[in-house]
């Protein structure tokens, strides 16, 4: 009898230890990171819990090539019984698409791969869904793979509308999402997605201009939302763009950020809460005349130079695996 008790106690202790040591938070796999030009490397990020092999795709600029490169890098794997290859991964590991806005560099991979995809929801605001429906899934640019709009409806993609500020659960992922509007020039709205998995949060920002240029105060409102999450040490990371270098004039931003503007925006957030140790992943760099990597390095250097907050800046690279866990 004492032996059984000991075994039970030991089993309990092992379970507790395993739980305590398990990393809690998110993994993010950038499938495409460039803010234009490189059609095999456009905005798309897989995000999922660390302890479950399931993802949502945050935007869908480049899907198949990104998964191919992530598989080659060992950043993602498949159970051997399911076979290999990017199609299986796309079909079985991506539970839903969250689309920040309908610009081509954020949806091209999704549209092209729709023919071989499995049924899934696409989560987007009403305005973004209207663009997808009216201008892409309309039997003119592409067949209607949605379950709304012009017949016949192929109904591969379930239209799920996100109302800003409302928490929606994402089926089969254990995650919820909250949409926040962003300003993307000339009154055009993009979206930020705040993911929550068991009390851990991850913020993904689609394309956004700075408040000082856009004059709609949307980043300020978003900072008010996430400041308490940073204070409570629940925010595991922020993905946000810096499309151009700091010397880009404001009238040529077209609804994008630069290091100068991003640092100014972080200063606004930094007035609410200490940003020491906050993970900020930089996305959507537009390749310059010397290519993508040279521009990424320049933008990262400009951010580091002005980093008085103690933020951890990281430049997103296609196919890598980022672990954004409880520190
Ligand atoms: Zn874009
Ligand atoms: Zn855009």
Image (tube, rainbow, N blue to C red):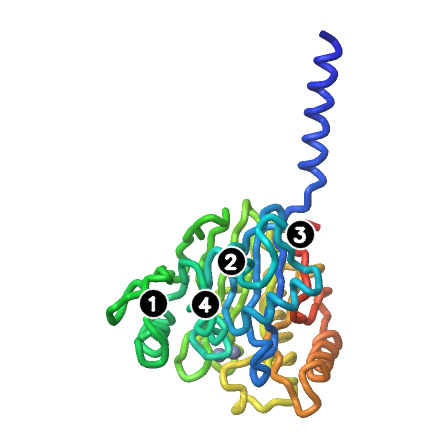
Tell me which label, 3 or 4, sits earlier in the chain.
4
Query: Secondary structure beneath disc 3?
Result: strand
Q: Are marks 1 and 4 in contact (CB under 8 Å)?
A: no
Find disc 1 in the rendering and name its residue: 126
Q: CA distance from mark 4 to mark 2?
A: 13 Å
The label nearer to you, 2 versus 1, is 2
The x, y position of residue 279, in whole percent, is: 67, 62
Task: Compute the Cα span from label 2 to label 1.
Answer: 22 Å
Provide the residue designation for mark 3: 325
Badge 4 local density, few (<14 within 10 Å), some, or many (20+)?
A: many
Pointer 3 or 2: first along the chain:
2
Where residue 72 sits, quadrant-wise, is: bottom right
Q: Is residue 194 visible?
A: no
Residue depth check, mark 4 versus mark 2: number of the one nearer the observer: 2
Q: Residues within 10 Å of mark 2 (few under 14, many from 20)?
A: many
Q: Give the CA separation, mark 1 to mark 4.
A: 11 Å
Residue placed under numbered mark 4 in the picture: 99
Of circles 3 and 4, the one toward us is 4
Residue plotted at (74% across, 74% down): 304
**Residue at 67% over, 92% down:** 289
| Proximity of marks 1 and 3: CB atoms separated by less than 8 Å | no
Looking at the image, is 126 positioned above or below residue 24?
A: below
**Where is 68 relative to 186, above or below?**
above
Eye-nearest disc, 3 or 2: 2
Identify the residue position indicated by label 2 in the image.
94
Q: Earlier in the sequence, mark 1 or mark 3?
A: 1
């Amino acid at each position: 009898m004492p032996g059984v008790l000991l075994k039970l106690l030991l089993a309990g202790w092992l379970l507790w230890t395993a739980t305590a040591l398990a990393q809690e938070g998110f993994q993010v796999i950038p499938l495409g990171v460039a803010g234009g030009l490189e059609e095999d490397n456009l905005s798309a990020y897989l995000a999922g819990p660390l302890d479950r092999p399931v993802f949502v795709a945050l935007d869908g600029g480049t899907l198949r090539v990104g998964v191919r490169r992530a598989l080659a890098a060992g950043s993602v794997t498949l159970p051997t019984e399911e076979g290999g290859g990017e199609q299986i991964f796309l079909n079985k590991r991506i539970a839903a698409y969250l689309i920040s806005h309908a610009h081509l560099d954020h949806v091209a991979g999704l549209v092209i791969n729709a023919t071989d995809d499995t049924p899934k929801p696409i989560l987007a605001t009403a305005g973004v869904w209207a663009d997808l429906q009216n201008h892409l899934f309309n039997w003119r640019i592409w067949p209607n793979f949605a379950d709304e709009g012009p017949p016949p409806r192929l109904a591969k993609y379930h239209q799920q509308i996100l109302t800003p500020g409302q928490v929606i659960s994402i089926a089969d992922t254990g995650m919820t999402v909250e949409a926040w509007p962003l300003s993307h020039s000339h009154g055009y709205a993009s979206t930020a997605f705040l993911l929550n998995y068991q009390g851990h949060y991850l913020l993904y920002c689609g394309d956004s201009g700075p408040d000082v240029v856009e004059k709609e105060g949307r980043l300020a409102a978003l900072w008010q939302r996430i400041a308490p999450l940073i204070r409570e040490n629940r925010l595991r990371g922020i993905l946000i763009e810096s499309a151009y270098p700091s010397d880009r004039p404001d009238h040529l931003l077209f609804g994008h950020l630069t290091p100068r503007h991003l640092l100014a925006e972080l200063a606004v957030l930094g007035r609410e809460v200490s940003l020491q140790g906050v993970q900020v992943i930089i996305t959507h760099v537009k390749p310059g005349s010397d290519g993508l990597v040279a521009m990424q390095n320049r933008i990262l250097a400009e951010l580091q130079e002005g980093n008085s907050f103690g933020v951890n800046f990281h430049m997103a690279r296609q196919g890598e695996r980022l672990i954004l866990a409880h520190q």
